[in-house]
Image (spheres, rainbow, N blue to C red):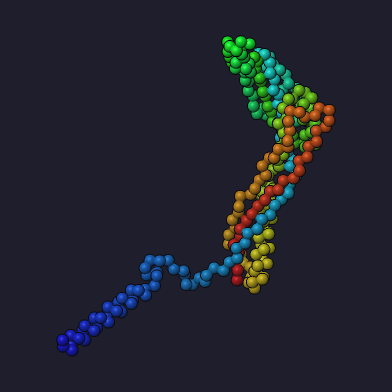
Amino acid sequence: MSSNVRTLAAAGVAAFAVAATTFVLRPASALGAPTADPSQPPARTITVSASSHVTLVPDVAHVGLGITATKPTVEAARAEAARVMNAIIAAAKGKGVAERDIRTTSIYLSPQYAPECTYAPDGSACAKPNRITGYTMNEQVDITVRNLDAAGSIVDAATAAGATNVNGISFVVDDPDKAASDAEVAAIGAAKAKAGAMAEAAGVTLGRVLSISETPVAIPYPYPYAGGAAAARDATTPVQPGTQDVTATVTVVFEIA
């Protein structure tokens, strides 16, 4: 091989090596991968989560009352249920409950049957299985009580009027959205205080808020006050609403310098 041929061959190998090296070391951006703007420094942040709750005293009660009447005929069962239900409604209105706050929740009528089979003394099967012996009429109402001091007396008045069902009492807050907003504001304040303490400990300066995210606020579900058909007629029924907590949790990202 001549010296010229050897020189050209060596040059070709060197060119290949340079090309290969250049391909491997190309910046990622040349391959289509995203790159950070070199004029913008990396974000410096503190992320904190905080919770807060507002304790509320319920201001509205829902009282479930009703009548269950069993009579030999449909007409008699309906008449008895209507008589008692009208007396229950009148008793509630007499305690200051408005018409709009009395709502019928259920009405149903069902037949009552004799035992499926009654055996004769000789052991033979009955001749008339599934014989209807009467009918049961059931009516229930929900009464919204806005004066909690009257809740117990409404139960007493209803049972005195003939109510056979006291289906319990549930307590609610009339405006839960305001309570939720108050809890959220308090949670953001707690997050800011927490981030400030962290920034001071780290020797940095807390900056503007970059983002806020929230866990759905826990609105208290109406909770029942146990009741039953055997409410005392000769004593005042005590009612205690207790308290409820509305809790908010937020996550806040702060810029730091």
Quarter-wise, where is residue 188 in the image?
A: bottom right
* Image height of 150 relative to 208, above or below: above
Q: Residue furthest left?
A: 1
Residue at x 69% of width, y 23% of height: 68
Query: x, y percentage for residue 175?
Result: 69, 43
* Image height of 86 relative to 42, above or below: above
Q: Nearer the viewer, residue 245 or 184?
A: 245
Q: In the shown orientation, is residue 150 left or right of residue 248?
A: right
Q: In the shown orientation, is residue 155 left or right of residue 210?
A: right
Residue 168 is at least partly visible in this image: yes
Q: Nearer the viewer, residue 76 or 216?
A: 76
Q: Residue furthest bottom?
A: 3
Query: x, y percentage for residue 14?
Result: 27, 82
Residue at x 62% of width, y 17% of height: 115
Specify the quadrant that holds the C terminus. Answer: bottom right
Quarter-wise, where is residue 136 in the image?
A: top right
Specify the quadrant that holds the N terminus. Answer: bottom left
